[in-house]
Image: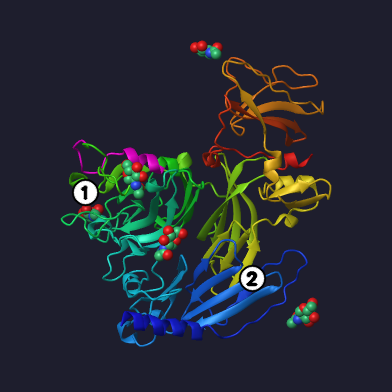
Amino acid sequence: TNAMALQSLFSLLVYLFILKCQEQNTSLFGIKPSRFHFNKPENYISMYHQEGTDRLYVGGQAMIYVLTFTDRGVHDLQGIFCGCGHKQYCKSHDLECDNFITVIQKVNDTFIVCGTNAGSPRCWMLVRVSSDSSQIAAASDISPPYPSQRSITLPADGNLYSAMSSAGSHSGSIRRTFGYQKLLKTENIWLLNPQFAGAAIIPSSHKFKEEIYFFFSEINKTARVDEEPYRARIGRICTVDEGGIKALLPESWTTFMKARVMCGAGNTQQQYNNMKQAVVLTAQDKRTGVMYGLFSNAWGRTVICAYSIEDIDQAFSTSKLKGYSSQFTGSRPGMCVRKNSTAGAHNDVKNLGVIRYYPEIEDVIRPVGVAPLDLPTDDQITHTVADIVLAVNDEHYSVLYLGTEQGKVLKVLHTSEEVFIISQYSLFHNEGPVLNMAIDSQKGHLYVGTAMEVQRLPLADCGRYGNTCRECILSRDPYCGWDRARRKCITIPPGYNRRTSPKEVVLPSNTTIFLPCPVRSFHATYRWEKDNCIKNYPCLFSGDFCVLGPIVDTPLKEGVFRCMATEDGFKVEVISFRVVNDGRLLAASLASTLGLSLLLAIATLWLH
Ligand SMILES: *[C@@H]1O[C@H](CO)[C@@H](O)[C@H](O)[C@H]1NC(C)=O
Ligand SMILES: *[C@@H]1O[C@H](CO)[C@@H](O)[C@H](O)[C@H]1NC(C)=O
Ligand SMILES: *[C@@H]1O[C@H](CO)[C@@H](O)[C@H](O)[C@H]1NC(C)=O
Ligand SMILES: *[C@@H]1O[C@H](CO)[C@@H](O)[C@H](O)[C@H]1NC(C)=O
Ligand SMILES: *[C@@H]1O[C@H](CO)[C@@H](O)[C@H](O)[C@H]1NC(C)=O
């Protein structure tokens, strides 16, 4: 019967995807965002976007909008998704008695669409070739019953992971809901009324050590009125997890652990405990990067806290477990182990018992800089996405896009030293809150949705910074550089950095080197900097060259050394060297995202 149900739903999906196709005229002059207006307000929207495409799927009230963005406008195709017939289940929430599309996701070639279906949520699948009845049965517990309830879905290696917030009789869970690996879940006692805020794959150079982090808040419903009911959390599981043994955790994760996350200044009372959304930036194959969390306090004030992925990983790998005082014998509980390892968690009954009863670690995760980002705005933030940008100076920068309650989007540069609002967009005719965003780093697009419309913006919008080098550079927008020949502030072309990265110097062991920097202007001050401005050194001697050599506190070891010239408040990079020991290549660590400061003149190397 499941196969039949699937067949008919498949047809339903195909037939209902036929409505209209319209093209809007958008000015090509200047970068006007391409926009799509809903015919009726959509107060809850879900989005699906696959990087590198121009297509955005937007789920609304009994409706899926398939939007294709072009330079000339937006094509749209709308499919009605009626979840009729269950209205008896919903009583007071009239607005929530329809079929709100809460999940649109793709796992390999299978599209999964879920809706609230009038309080009894269900999923529809578009299976490519054959319809496997077990798959549709397995795909339960993906959509929440009400559209206001968050659910998170994350595809990884052909499996779908989903996290459902608690609602009504649902206690909330983290599951592998679909795929070729064993379907697993959390034990109910591991989560206390979780409200999910995000999830991310945390890569590793060893595939079997790959993890997924889930971000959520827990609510203590019996907390006294003068107590804080929220606690922000990170939960993690290993993707290799195949469940426990018959007697212990047979259908559950054997690698689940959770940690408390703090966001607030030190140990003060001013804490933000309700994590509403979280995004992660990581390297391709390494466990480095940064997590940004959007938090609110009891008065609804919102802040952003940043966390180092290395710190979180360190805590999960070394912390004591709360309430467990015995020593670990053999392997540590909850660690990711190879599937075929005989020493694996499957056989280690004792470790299964530890995870079952003591999944929480004692260490508390604190933000980088021990406080929320010092954002110079009082706007209430409703949604966040983030991007890593390789600027012309060969450094990686984090750029956050913050959607606000007033329908604005703030573009924010984050470095270890400061937070800087690069630009602010007031995009919408009406001032409704930003409800959802999707980012495409590959194509350089940002999609922003409110209840009335969806817009697409370019991530690099360099034309807005005026027509002088100074304005271009002072914008501090890492996507942009000054093109001297064309006298324009332009988007840094792909691959540009490969041509301009620091000159490499291989340092045989126990040798001394001197790095020369040509002095071009005698009005300028020359200095050397290492590790992205954190350390800086004077010229050892100067004249036609400002030379950096080994002095007592300047061991010329591995690292990137940059010669910076400052004149009239402008700082430009003159030359840079990457010193490598014994031919061993330096790993360009993404951790530098956190350990770098801003070069005022990011466009330096452009001045060739
Ligand atoms: C759209 O643009 C074309 C070409 O510029 C123009 O001829 C046409 O009148 C425009 N249509 C609308 C509806 O503005
Ligand atoms: C999905 O894709 C992954 C990786 O591309 C592959 O290993 C897996 O077998 C695929 N799963 C299915 C069900 O096709
Ligand atoms: C919830 O708060 C109550 C009242 O302070 C407390 O007794 C209880 O232990 C808390 N529950 C949890 C799980 O922390
Ligand atoms: C199983 O383990 C052995 C030894 O630990 C290893 O050589 C082999 O590659 C593993 N096989 C798989 C499929 O992971
Ligand atoms: C390099 O210096 C270390 C100690 O500073 C010394 O032990 C080693 O022998 C030296 N190597 C060479 C090749 O000179």
**Which stretch did the figure color magenta?**
312-327
Left or right: 353 in relation to 533: left
Quadrant position of the N terminus in the picture: bottom left
Look at 33% across and 75% down and name the residue there.
Answer: 133
Q: Which secondary structure lies at badge 2? A: strand
Crowd class of label 2 (few under 14; some 14 to 19; many from 20; radius 10 Å): many
- Residues at discs 2 and 1 in contact (Cβ within 8 Å): no
**12 or 62: nearer the eye?**
12
For residue 280: magenta?
A: no
- Residue type at mark 1 is Leu
Q: Which mark is residue 352?
A: 1
Magenta span includes 313: yes
Residue at 53 percent of width and 42 percent of height: 590
Q: Nearer the viewer, residue 421 or 216?
A: 216
The answer to which of marks 2 and 1 sits earlier in the sequence is 2
> Can you name the residue that lies furthest to the left here?
247
For label 2, the residue is 69
- Can you give x and y, in whole percent of width and height, for residue 65 in the image? 54, 77
At x 44%, y 54%, the residue is 200
Q: Which mark is residue 550?
A: none
Q: Label 2 amino acid?
A: Phe
Gap in angstroms between the C-alphas marked 2 and 1: 50 Å
Per the image, label 1 sits on a secondary structure element best described as helix
Q: Residues within 10 Å of mark 1 (few under 14, many from 20)?
A: many
Left or right of 123 in this view: 326: left
Q: Is residue 408 visible?
A: yes
Task: Tell me which corner region of the image, top left, top right, bottom left or bottom right, holds residue 418.
Answer: top right
- Relative to 27, residue 23 above or below: below
Looking at the picture, how far across and down is residue 546, in whole percent?
A: 74, 22
Residue 598 percent location from the top left of the image: 63, 40
Ligand 4's image quarter is top left
Image quadrant holding the C terminus, namely: top right
